[in-house]
Image (tube, rainbow, N blue to C red):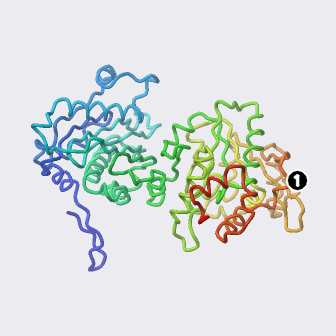
Amino acid sequence: MEITLKGDAVIESIPSLKDKALRINLNENIYGTFAEIGAGQETVRHFFRAGGASGTIAKAMSAYDKSFSDAIYGTEQENRYVTEDRLKKMLSHEVKLIENRLSREEYPNKMFFSYANTVATIDFAKRFKGHGWVGIRYQVDSNQKQYNEITLHIRFKETDARLQQETLGKLGTNLIYGAFYKYNQPKKLLRYLYDHIDKDQLEIDTINFSGPSFQEVDNRLMSLQLLKNGMTDAVMFAPDGNNVLPARVLYKKNILAFRGSFRPVTKVNMDMYEQSYQLFLSENKVKKENTQVIFEITLSNLRASGGEIDEQDFMDRARLLCSLGQTVLISNFQEYYKLVEYFNLYTKNRMGLSMGINNLIDIFDEKYYRHLSGGILEAFGKLFNKDLKIYLYPMLTENKTMTTSEDLKVHPRMKELYKYFKYNGKLVDIKNYDPEILNIFSRKVLKMISNAEQGWEEMLPEGVSDIIKKQKLFGYEG
């Protein structure tokens, strides 16, 4: 047991990896298999070394050769083996073997499990740092017919294969221990995955819980915990509400992104989306079948006035966007150039950002780039050096005049810089907007919903008010 001290006070007690493995081994009812591919048998090694492993480990294996692996788990159509599909095949196969080979009459009280990982560590040229899928399928009761499952995707940050292997072994031990002893506290289970691991060693960017013990767990909320805990900078979930691997969604795609509060989605939001989408598809490098639309919310936008994240408010926005069939990204990228850099990890194809004129004003504000040695020029190099266009929705000022990119006022020092990007085609005005809806603002609609005022439904796209009422979002009480 490791104890952390602050002054004379004990603030946290973290079991050592040996203690975790030993506690699993000494539980006479926990019994299962380990299947590890790509980074050695690093997880099971902790359980062998802890002692008492014979009562826990039914089998430990690796199948590095592709032909052997295919013979055991089946072939992969795209010839890719470090995937979620591969992990699930491994888990399913190993669980079936346990059930087929071990009689329940002989082992009536055993809680079966299968732990698996499929991993690619850093390559010899050190161009790719490596990543992998890790998971466990298990029972918390011997009578449990349906298994629980926890799967996660990791990215290595270390630049040495041996260190990556050791980190993977620690993560796997933490996962197995948490799965059995912290399953009723999934948020804590998530935090404990980093026991004895530093954040600069490993990133977890996707996690999903399923099974009878996690029926009350919303995986979108678990995604939010990854961000809050500093485990990753961005998470994504699909229209069905499940977390998805960003790389899988964004890889080699044309990306059109919308940043907003979406609290709630208004007619202005959807008009901006529809008009930007048409402009984006008209680009000669963009094909509809290869285009991915992303609705993005920053972590700072989710914070309440006290600095804390309102989880209910987050879930309201998530449910609404998913109900509208949108793919949602929650990020820690307050500056737009960081968002573009993130997308550029997965694609070199043309990208588009859709925003209001007020957001463009912020982009040209130097105060946001004081932390960069190159200031705003460095940020703009990262933003506009990519194959990127910004689609601008007009703004209605207080005196009812329209502001577009043509008459936007920026700081005198930024004037020539603004002209450079404007007249090089990087900034594109949305001209087919609906002038009748420009006075609609999300904060106004939200206030009307909270105060039970009449008429807010007319400010939202068709069907959105029905979703809000049916799911009682944003404080709607009916």
Tell me where residue 288 sits by quadrant.
Answer: top right
Residue 73 lies, in percent from the top left, at: 32, 26
**Residue sitting at 43 percent across and 23 percent down?**
79
Q: Nearer the viewer, residue 303 or 46?
A: 303
Tell me where residue 469 sits by quadrant.
Answer: bottom right
Q: Nearer the viewer, residue 366 or 215?
A: 215
Residue 151 lies, in percent from the top left, at: 37, 43
User: Would you say 21 lies left or right of 224 here?
Assistant: left
Label 1: state its secondary structure: loop
Mark 1 residue type: Glu
Read off the residue under disc 1.
406
Residue reaching furthest front? 478
Mark 1, residues whose alpha carbon is within 10 Å: few (<14), some, or many (≥20)? few
The image shows residue 255, relative to residue 365, as above or below, that is above
Q: Quadrant of the N terminus?
A: bottom left
The image shows residue 50, relative to residue 33, as above or below, that is below
Q: Nearer the viewer, residue 102 or 249?
A: 102
**Residue sitting at 29 percent across and 57 percent down?**
182
**Residue sitting at 74 percent across and 35 percent down?**
281
User: Would you say 360 lies left or right of 41 here?
Assistant: right
Residue 36 lies, in percent from the top left, at: 28, 36
User: Would you say 134 lies left or right of 271 here?
Assistant: left
Residue 266 lies, in percent from the top left, at: 71, 55
Q: How many marks?
A: 1
Q: Quadrant of the C terminus?
A: bottom right
The image shows residue 180, relative to residue 313, as above or below, that is above
